[in-house]
Structures are given as C-alpha cells and as structure tokens.
Amino acid sequence: MKIKYKKFNTIDQKEINSVIKVMKSGILSQFLGKDGQFFLGGKKVKEFERKIEKYFDVKYAITVNSWTSGLIAAFGAIGLEPGDEVILPTWTMSACAMSILNWNAIPIFADIDLETYNIDPDSIRKLISKKTKAILVVDIFGKVADYNRILKIAKQYNLKVICDSAQAPGAKYRNKFTSTLGDIGGFSFNYHKHIHTGEGGVIVTNNSNYAKKLRLIRNHAESSLNEYGFTKKKQLANMLGYNFRMGEIEAAIGIEQLKKLKSIIRKRRKNANFLIKKLSNLPGIILPSSNNTVENVYYFLPFQIDSKIIKFKKSFITNFLKKNGVPIISEYENIHLKPAFQNLIIYGTKGFPWSLNKKKYRKNFYSKGICPNAEYLNDISFFAIPICLYDFNNDDLLKIVNCFYALWKILKSN
C-alpha cells in the first residue's frame, strides 16, 4: 500500500484574522530590555500569558521564543551553578541536556521505565550525589511520568524539580496538569506540538520569586534587576539575561490555538485508543498501558516488540510497515551516546576544567551500558507512530491496522 495522510494542521481563519489584526496595528513586539511598562511585553503576549494561567490553573506564565529557551531560563531561575548536577532521562530531546550545560552544570543521565518511557525513579535514586541540584522530568510522547515517587525523592533530598511537558500540554497526573507539579514547568509551541505558534514556548510556575527571575532572564536581566529588587549578591546568581521574548504575532496565534487544545487532545486519545484496541490481539507486540491516575495526551504512539515471542529483527518489522505506508520511527534519543558527550569538558569553578569521561571525574561517564533500558529499546524493541504529524481519519486508521495484521500473518507463517 501507498498511503497519503493529511498533515496535522489546526491553523484556520481564526489564526489568520488574529495575525492580520496585529499586522494592521503595526506593533509586532513591544518588549524593551529595560525597566518600564514594556519590560513584560506587548498586549497580546500579556493576554496569552493570562489565558495560559487560567487554563492550567497556575499563578504565573512566562512566554518565550522556544521551549529550549524556557529550559535554559528555568535552570537559571533555580540558581544552577557550575559543577551542580541535574538528573534527567537520556531518552529525550538533546536540548534538555544542553540547557543544563548552558550554566556549566553537569547532566547526569538516568535510565527510563520500560512501560512509561519516562525517567525511572529507581535510577534517579541511585544517581543522587552531594552535587545533585535538580531533577528534570520529561513527559515523553505525551505520556505521564511517575510523579508521586519522583516528588517524594525530591523532597527527601531537597532537590528542585523541573517538569518538561513539551510533548504533553494537557496531560494530567491525579487530576493536576503535569507541568504544574514541580517547581517550574512548561510546554513547547513549535510546529508539530499539540498547539503551535510556529516556534515558541511557555514556562509556568506557582513560585513568585522564580517568576521574577524567569522574566528577567527572558529579557536582558542585567538591565532591570532593580525593578524586582535583586541587589544582594546571592540574588544575582545567573541574573544575566537573554532575548528569549515572544512576538505579538506568535502570541495572537497562541491565543486561538489554546482554545483548540481540548478538542485536539480528545481526537488524539480517540485515535490512539482505537489503534491500541485493534492491535491488542497481535501476539508479541507491547502496547501503551494506562491507569486511573494519569491522562496521557499522545504525541507519539509507542510500541515494543517482545523478542521472546517474535524472533524477527526489529528492522524487518519497521521496514515492512514503512514500505506499506505506515508512518514509523524506529528509534529515539539516547543522549548519553551522542558524540558531544564522549569527551565533554566543563569549565567554571574550583577543580575545573573536568573532562567527564576521564578518571578525574568518573570513568566511562557517558558510555554505552549506563542506561540499559533506553539502549535496549533503541537497539531491539522500540518503534512508534508519530501521530503528532498527521490528522488521521477512520479509513487511515483501518489501513494501518490492516497493514499490521498482514505483517503478523507473515511473521506467523515463518
């Protein structure tokens, strides 16, 4: 089969009209990097932030030009310093680690849970040291992490928790939005996320002090410290600023997109649940599970091959599906194995520079074998349908199901 799927796109006349109004106003941005009424941006940016606060039931929303910028700002706001360690999953986007390196801090890669694909609390506990400052939790694929156990660990060791819900806006854990469960959280608004503004993101927090710092880091902090009363030495850590500001056009689009989030999530869940139900009869395929404590929002629909039942290599299965029109990705990230981390040197405080893969710090710091679950998934068992990219209809879903059944017939006959 050769199947063409409609691309996911929720931009319609409402967004177009909102952009036209901004264009006609002539005000595409109203940020100024200094004290005054425009330090917090223009009318649409402020309106978008208030609407996000209301939707996610959070005290403070700070828009940014990307979620990568949001992560950098979040780690700056908690006072991350050179030599501090942040525990994060290796199974995530590279920006998660790079935002830590931005402050000359050290990413410590934890393994993931094979069922949720999110950071494994047991792995976190094993990696905590005297230098650990924070845990970065990533709700990967729109699936929810085990927040109960993670937050207990964080409380026990007095660690900050950053919630990266870039792929999971609207996901909930025990009826609370995942992004609001830690000290700081946020979402991505780039083009293939649930809602998008082209590029962009938002940081959310219930902590007023963090909110002040985040707004400073977003907009040239060094020029506006007095406005927020940051004058003491301890308060000035990481109070250098960037231009992480969102424009009025992106904010206007975001206001309209936010209105559509519930319907987008509803359709994603319907499509994912349809595929899970139809494919559940196939032996040797491990499907996503759920429980009453979580509400997943499905960015990818992940699968695993049970190698005890299926003796064919993963490449045979994924190549068959691809050739017959099923959109498939066959691997995800294992950041600890990326070339950038094989001879990483950190500069910044006493005892530095440290080459992290040398004996001076930890031998084989970022070597293969430190995250066996994540490595096993990429090498042996994982593949996924990127449902974030397509607007599937019922016929599309049935064709995908039929292709799976045709493949399993071949597997069985051999």
Image (cartoon, rainbow, N blue to C red):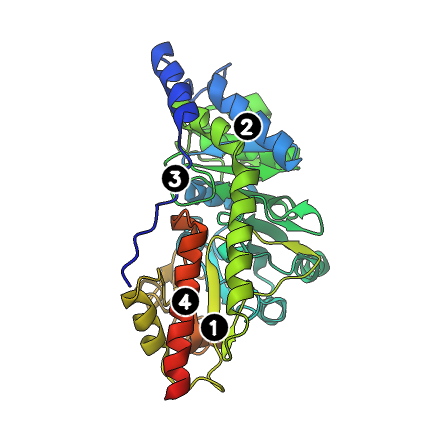
- Does the rendering let one see residue 336? no
Residue pointed to by mark 1: 304
Residue pointed to by mark 4: 402
At numbered mark 4, what does the secondary structure look like: helix, strand or loop? helix
Residue pointed to by mark 3: 9
Q: Residue at x 43, y 71 (%)?
A: 382
Q: Quadrant of the C terminus?
A: bottom left
The numbered mark, 4 or 2, whose residue comes first in the sequence reads 2
Residue pointed to by mark 2: 49
Q: Residues within 10 Å of mark 4 (few under 14, many from 20)?
A: some
Q: Quadrant of residue 212?
A: top right
- CA distance separating discs 4 and 2: 44 Å
Q: Nearer the viewer, mark 4 or mark 3?
A: 4
The numbered mark, 3 or 2, whose residue comes first in the sequence reads 3
At numbered mark 2, what does the secondary structure look like: helix, strand or loop? helix
Tag 1: amino acid = Gln
Frontmost residue, 335 versus 160: 335
Q: Position of residue 379 (x, y in %)?
A: 38, 76
The numbered mark, 4 or 1, whose residue comes first in the sequence reads 1
- CA distance separating discs 4 and 1: 18 Å
Farthest top residue in view: 25
Left or right: 288, with 406 as reference point: right
Q: Nearer the viewer, mark 3 or mark 1?
A: 3
* Rendered position, 45 above or below 272: above
Tag 2: amino acid = Glu
The number of discs equals 4
The numbered mark, 4 or 3, whose residue comes first in the sequence reads 3
Q: Position of residue 392 (x, y in %)?
A: 42, 50
The numbered mark, 1 or 2, whose residue comes first in the sequence reads 2
The numbered mark, 3 or 1, whose residue comes first in the sequence reads 3
Tag 3: amino acid = Asn
